[in-house]
Image (cartoon, rainbow, N blue to C red):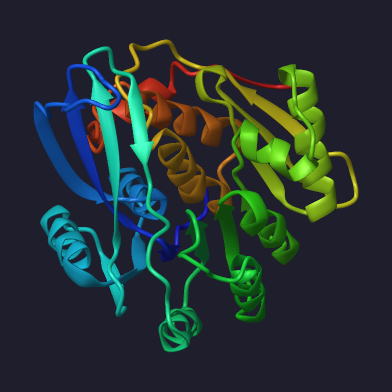
Amino acid sequence: MSKQGRTLIFALNPSVDVEWEVPNVVWEEKNNILSERRWAGGKGVNVARWFRLLGGDGLLVLPLGGMNGREMESFLKEEGLAYHAVPIVQSTRANIIVTTRERRQIRLNPLGPELTRQEWDQLFDFLKEKPVDTVVFSGALPRNAPVDTYRRLLELCRQLGPVKTILDCDKKAFEQGVLGKPFLVKPNTTELEQWVGRRLSGQSQILEAACELCLTAETNVLVSMGAEGALLAWRDTEGKSPRIFRAYPYEVTVLNTVGAGDSLLAAAALTLPNGMEPIESLKLSIAASTLAVSKPAGILPRKEEIYELSHKIQVSEI
């Protein structure tokens, strides 16, 4: 793997994550909260957290405002995460995770703040000013943001020189974003279905859709499949069919699924743009996501655990 340079990780709609543990959810009645945990969350923040844990040199870029924004900053400082905050008028959102004794979860995600034109300009300008090798765009867009926001950011990156870009979002933002020709996209199965416009049943259909996206958008495609592992369509040579790699899951007791895809993406963002072979990259990615689901939300394993487990992960080229 070649020497890794600085990576920017954009979290355009971060959140304070709040987990309430309850005995059970009873509709139209009072539900007693047994415990509460709060931490800095949102997809991009999770990616930055795992990226640093794995040894990456990343800078988190995010808009922050209001009391929740101040709380976010306190969490980021406490963790020692490197970040650049763009101050905004409206408040950062708070996501609520309700977890029952049976470990079933309900997630309540507000749409988040609406950014002003000046606030957007600050985010775009910051991207122009920083010499970087890799830029990751991860998570939902803020309220009422243009659906082509990620596409415009990706196009800006292409104007800045040899910058490798990575995109993880969904729906219209993803559909528009892939037009910006990122180096890598990471849909889950549902997001891939949204892009192709049809239901996907079984590995063969997921593989076919990943190849279709890979060739149409001229991008590498990492599909996270939850308990089924992951699949990578890799553009080894332009104009030819992509190479396909299948990563198989490692069985653990699942305590939580928040951030599993983000840990997978962080490992891929650290390794693939910097020359690691796809098989080795997928081993590390699956090891990270496996340990993510085996811990409570927001709790990270030791770096050594991830690298040790990566040697046990099975990946094959198909």
Q: Quick check: 59 left or right of 68?
A: right
| Residue 258 quadrant | top left
Q: Quick check: 291 left or right of 262?
A: left
Please report the residue visible at 21 percent of the width from the left and 71 percent of the height from the top.
66
Query: From what the image shows, is residue 100 above or below residue 243?
Result: above
- Image x and y of residue 164, in percent: 59, 62
User: Residue farthest to the right?
Assistant: 239
- Image x and y of residue 38, in percent: 16, 45
Q: Quick check: 52 left or right of 37?
A: right
Give the quarter of the figure containing the C terminus. Answer: top right
| Residue 64 quadrant | bottom left
Residue 236, can we see it? no
Q: Quick check: 180 left or right of 57?
A: right
Query: From what the image shows, is residue 259 above or below residue 109?
Result: above
Please report the residue visible at 36 percent of the width from the left and 36 percent of the height from the top.
107
Query: From what the image shows, is residue 194 above or below residue 313?
Result: below
Residue 184, can we see it? yes
- Image x and y of residue 226, in percent: 52, 24
Count of picture labels: 0
Q: Nearer the viewer, residue 29 or 176?
A: 29
Q: Nearer the viewer, residue 58 or 197?
A: 197
User: Residue farthest to the front?
Assistant: 28
Q: Nearer the viewer, residue 157 or 97?
A: 97
Please report the residue visible at 84 percent of the width from the left and 51 percent of the height from the top.
216
Q: Nearer the viewer, residue 232 or 140?
A: 140
Please report the residue visible at 52 percent of the width from the left and 54 percent of the height from the top.
2
- Image x and y of residue 211, in percent: 80, 37
